[in-house]
Image (spheres, helix red, strand yellow):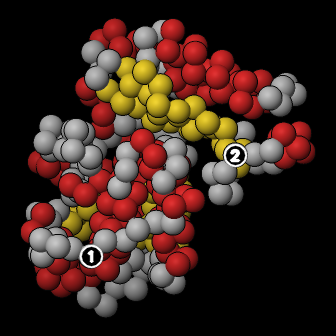
Amino acid sequence: MKVVHTIEDLRDQLRGQLRVSFVPTMGNLHEGHLALMKLARQHGDPVVASIFVNRLQFGPNEDFDRYPRTLQNDIDKLERARDVYVLFAPDERELYPEPQSYRVQPPQELGDILEGECRPGFFGGVSTVVLKLFSCVQPRVAVFGKKDYQQLMVIRNMCRQFQLPVEILAHETVRQDNGLALSSRNMYLQETERQEAPQLFATLKFLQQQIHAGIHDVPQLEQIAIAGLNARGWQVDYIAVRRRRDLHKPTREEVVAGEPLVVLAAAKLGATRLIDNLEI
C-alpha cells in the first residue's frame, strides 16, 4: 500500500487509472471502515482511502481536538486487510490552502434538519471536504456507510446537483453482536455506558416493530421512544421517523400505505453522542 500526503503525489499514483474507487474516512479505523473498503474493491480498482479529520464539520463545542488520530495503527490495519492501494493522508493546509476557503452549502430542506439542526454547518463542512476529496481522487465509485444516513443523502444530492461522475454506493451499518453500530466515538464510552449503548438500536427496533404491527401514530411513537431513553439517563437530540426519499415527515396516510420509512436517532450517553438509524 502506498501512503501519500500531497495531492501531487496522489495524482502521480493514480495517473491513467479510470476505475478508481474511493472511501473517505476520518481515521481511527474499525471493522465498519474495512467493510467499506472491501465493497469498494468489488466495484473498482485501484482502491483509494483517505484519512483526514475535517475541522469544518466540527462545531465550536465539539470534539475536534480530542478526536482520535491513530494514523500508524490505521496504516497497519489497512496493510493487513490488503484492499487499499493508496492511502491519502493530507494535512490541513494541503486541503485548505487559503484561509477563506470556498464552501458547499446543502439545500436547507435536507441539510438543516435533524443532524443539521443539531449541528449547524455540519453538512456544509462534510460536503465541502468530500467535494475537495473527489476533485483530488477523481473516483468512479465512492463508498459510504448507512450509519450516517443523512450524510449519505447529502452526498448523493451534491453529486446530482454538480453532475459529478461518481457513483455513490452505500454499505449497510456494521454492528456488534449486541446491535451497537460501530463508530470511532464508541471508544469514548465508559464500561457501564458500553452496556447501555445498545439500547439506542433496541429503541429503533421497537419503533420499527410498532409500525409493522399497524400502529401509525408516528408522533406519539417518537415521544414514547424519546421518553424511554431519557428515563434511562440518555439525553436525546431527536428520534424521528421520516420518509426515506427525502427525510421529510410522513403523513399518516403515507404510513398506512406503506411509504418506505427510516427512523433516525441521535442521543448522548454520558459525554458521548451516538447516532443510528433503521429502515422501516
Residue 101 horizontal side relative to residue 261, left or right: left
Quick one: which residue is furthest to the bottom in this view?
A: 16
Q: CA distance from mark 2 to mark 1?
A: 32 Å
Which mark is first along the chain, 1 or 2?
A: 1
**Residue at (21%, 44%) from the top-left corner?**
60
Q: Amino acid at mark 1?
A: Tyr
Residue placed at 50% from the left, 15% from the top?
Answer: 230
Q: Residue at x 32, y 18 (%)?
A: 270
Q: Check the image and report above or below for 241 versus 157.
A: above
- Taking 182 as reference, is 29 above or below it? below
Q: Nearer the viewer, residue 57 or 191?
A: 57
Give the quadrant of residue 139. Answer: bottom left
Residue 135 appears at what percent x and percent y?
31, 80
Image quadrant for the C terminus? top right
Near mark 1 (Cα within 10 A), the count class, few <14, some 14-19 or many ≥20, is few
Question: Camera-side residue: 235 or 200?
Answer: 235
Number of the label disc, if any, that sits on residue 249 = 2
Q: Which residue is mark 1?
A: 102
Tell me how many marks there are. Answer: 2
Image coords of residue 277 (percent x, y): 56, 38
User: Which amino acid type is shown beneath numbered disc 2?
Assistant: Lys
Residue at 14 percent across and 82 percent down: it is 8
Residue 245 horizontal side relative to residue 54, left or right: right
